[in-house]
Amino acid sequence: FSNGHAKYFARGAGNVENEYADSRITNVKVNDKGVLRIETEWVNDRGASGSDTYVARFQDNDFYLIGYDGMYNNPPTTYSFNLLTGKAVTVSGYAEDTKRKTSAIKKLPLKKLSEVKIGEYKCEDYYEY
């Protein structure tokens, strides 16, 4: 993965201006069911940081994105998207003020992993929840 930087792994259509000053892949693993998990960490040009996990499965001779988890530090927020079931869970706030929201998201055709720019693609930018 060429120094662990996501831009060397990312493939996709179109030019996307990357607001993330540093985005790198920290872990890639495949479980015993053949599900691929790509974990990243990032810092944007405004100093915020977080992590993203892209979950894909192999079908029809390609990997397809089936899930995405994102974590942001300020304010503390986590997103979890299950693109197979059409559910999104958002947890935000500090310990005493934590809010949890489960939402239905519109089920769209699954994206090929080759169409997803790892380290730049955020499900919350594409799905209403």
Image (cartoon, rainbow, N blue to C red):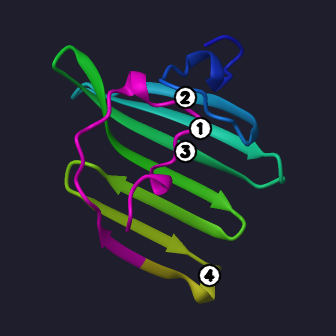
Of tags 1 and 2, the one toward the viewer is 1
For mark 2, what is the residue?
A: 27
For mark 4, what is the residue?
A: 95
Q: Is residue 30 magenta?
A: no
Q: Position of residue 60 (x, y in %)?
A: 16, 19
Q: Distance from label 3 to label 4 (Cα)?
A: 21 Å
The kind of secondary structure element at disc 2 is strand
On the picture, is 87 further left or further right than 71?
A: left
Q: Distance from label 2 to label 4 (Cα)?
A: 28 Å
Of pointers 3 and 4, the one earlier in the residue sequence: 3
User: Residue most toward the top?
Assistant: 2
Amino acid at pointer 4: Ala
Residues at marks 1 and 2 touching, judged by CB atoms closer than 8 Å: no
Q: Distance from label 1 to label 2 (Cα)?
A: 16 Å
The kind of secondary structure element at disc 4 is helix
Q: Main secondary structure of the magenta part?
A: loop
Above/below status of 45 relative to 88: above
Q: Residues within 10 Å of mark 4 (few under 14, many from 20)?
A: few
For mark 1, what is the residue?
A: 120
Q: Position of residue 57 (x, y in %)?
A: 26, 29
Region of the chain picked out in magenta, as a range: 101-129
The quadrant in which the C terminus is found is bottom left
Amino acid at pointer 2: Asn
Residue at image x 25%, y 25%? 34
Q: Distance from label 4 to label 1 (Cα)?
A: 28 Å
Q: Which mark is residue 52?
A: 3
Of tags 1 and 3, the one toward the viewer is 1
Q: Residues within 10 Å of mark 3 (few under 14, many from 20)?
A: many
